[in-house]
Amino acid sequence: MPDNLSPEDRIRTMRAVKSQNTSPERRLRAMLAGMGLRGWRVNPKDIVGKPDIAFSRERLAIFVDGCFWHGCPECNRSMPEDNKEYWSRKIERNIQRDISNTEKLQVDGWKVVRIWEHQLKKRGDLKHINSIIKSFIIKPTLWSK
Ligand SMILES: [Zn+2]
């Protein structure tokens, strides 16, 4: 973190860094529970990229990417005027890391689902995400019904 951040920027940055329990992730977990799924792990440290949700037996990793931090092309991200370069470099690094983590997992036999934060806010997108996850998780043992 550069030293020339304003106090407000610093607070915002810290908050964003520990935003593991923000509502998009919670919405995703509610959706999975609603689908009758069980047995996932949250942010497992032993899995590349610490996915938001991991089904180890099914080797399915689900990431919820924050639109601002991960550079969503569909959302208009207004960069703070101060330190614009710092933010865009940071976001660019995140994008590269997302790509490389996804590749590492896939090479290791994982199926990877990346969901944009904004997709968890739209009803139509939820249906779509729901069916993608269903198509990956085919073992009936994981379904409670
Ligand atoms: Zn977005």
Image: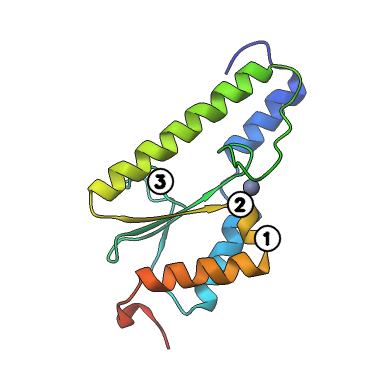
> For the residue labelled by badge 2, is the local secondary structure a helix, a strand or a loop?
helix
Which comes before the other along the chain, label 3 or label 2?
3
Categorize mark 1 by other alpha carbons within 10 Å: few (<14), some (14-19), many (20+).
few
Which comes before the other along the chain, label 1 or label 3?
3
| Residue 96 screen position, x and y as percent | 43, 32
Q: Residue at x 62, y 60 (%)?
A: 120
Residue 11 quadrant? top right
Q: Nearer the viewer, residue 9 or 104?
A: 104
Residue 74 drawn above or below residue 126: above
| Residue 82 screen position, x and y as percent | 74, 17
- Compared across the picture, whether 81 is left or right of 130 comes to right
Q: Which residue is mark 1?
A: 121
Residue 88 quadrant? top right
Residue type, label 2: Glu
Residue type, label 1: Lys
Q: Residue at x 31, y 81 (%)?
A: 141
| Residue 142 screen position, x and y as percent | 35, 77
Q: Which residue is mark 2?
A: 117
Question: How was the colour assigned to the protein in this rendering?
Answer: rainbow
- Compared across the picture, whether 117 is left or right of 111 comes to right
Categorize mark 3 by other alpha carbons within 10 Å: few (<14), some (14-19), many (20+).
some
Q: Nearer the viewer, residue 76 or 140?
A: 76
Disc marking residue 50: 3
- Kindly report which numbered mark, 3 or 2, lies closer to the viewer in this rendering: 2
Discs 1, 2 touching: Cβ within 8 Å: yes
Residue 107 drawn above or below residue 17: below
